[in-house]
Amino acid sequence: MFATIAGYIVLGLSIAAPVGPINVEIIKRGLAFGFWPALFVGLGGMSSDLVLMGAMFTGISTVLTWTWVKITLMLLGCIILIQTGWTSLRTDQLKVEERKTERLPSETRMRLGSFMKGFLIAGTNPMNILFWVGIYGSVLSGAFQEENLFHSFLVSSLVFVGIGLWNINLAFTMHFGRFLANPFVLKSINSVASIVLIGFGCKFGYDGLNLIRTYWI
């Protein structure tokens, strides 16, 4: 029993750990604003994953394999990631004096904005969606087909425990890491993270255009 519980938690960790747009955004928010904004990016991504899991359970996975749906998601992901990365990159170039005169958003607005950013990035990330479809097909769908609904709920909950543990760990690491790094290092990390987000966005756009060219031209 313990091995089963640990296995599904590790599965959640393995889902969340690979470097992707969500982790990059958590790093950026953690270095810039601290623990809570970074964590809320992860919570937004988890909420999007939860919606996707529910959609998988209702049989929407077939819809997600349609060509026009994949193209739409790729182009949306392209726009959101490039806009996020470019905005952050431009903001990072502001002078410290200019930043001090800016009116910073309240904590509530910042957390809500971080949550929505995480939700949108995860919800329009075709890699994330296709990954969940594959995971559901190979692991989670079998659990939901069990007659014991409690077992199905437990499996899904354990997966999300693993994802949540990774998000908390990354948010904590970035929160305390920003106090150990000098401004040049923080600026460099933020710039690299922003460029990575733009790179992911360009990749999604390129893949979407390739699909259009392959199927409709």
Image: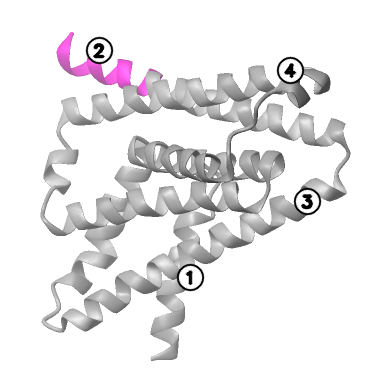
**Could you classify mark 1 by the number of other residues whose Cα lies within 10 Å: few (under 14), some (14-19), or many (20 or more)?**
some
Q: Which of marks 2 and 1 is in front?
A: 1
- Rendering coords of residue 117 (x, y %): 45, 37
Q: Residue 177 carries which label?
A: 3
Which of the pair 111/32 is nearer the observer? 111
Please tell me which of labels 2 and 1 falls first in the chain.
Answer: 1
Horizontal side of residue 13 vs 135, given as left or right? right
Q: Residue 93 carries which label?
A: 4
Q: Do the residues labelled 4 and 1 touch (CB within 8 Å)?
A: no
Find numbered disc 3 in the image and state the secondary structure of the residue it sits on.
Answer: helix
Please tell me which of labels 4 and 1 falls first in the chain.
Answer: 1
Horizontal side of residue 68 vs 73, given as left or right? left
Please tell me which of labels 2 and 3 falls first in the chain.
Answer: 3
Residue at 40 percent of width and 20 percent of height: 79
User: Label 1 is placed on what type of residue?
Assistant: Val
- Rendering coords of residue 196 (x, y %): 59, 29
- Rendering coords of residue 10 (x, y %): 48, 70
The N terminus: image quadrant: bottom left
Magenta region, main secondary structure: helix
Q: Nearer the viewer, mark 1 or mark 3?
A: 3
**Could you classify mark 4 by the number of other residues whose Cα lies within 10 Å: few (under 14), some (14-19), or many (20 or more)?**
few
User: Label 3 is placed on what type of residue?
Assistant: Gly
Task: Provide the residue designation for mark 1.
Answer: 10
Find numbered disc 1 in the image and state the secondary structure of the residue it sits on.
Answer: helix
Please tell me which of labels 1 and 3 falls first in the chain.
Answer: 1
Q: Residue 213 carries which label?
A: 2
Residue at 30 percent of width and 78 percent of height: 154
Spatial CA distance of label 2 from label 1 is 39 Å
Q: Nearer the viewer, mark 4 or mark 1?
A: 4
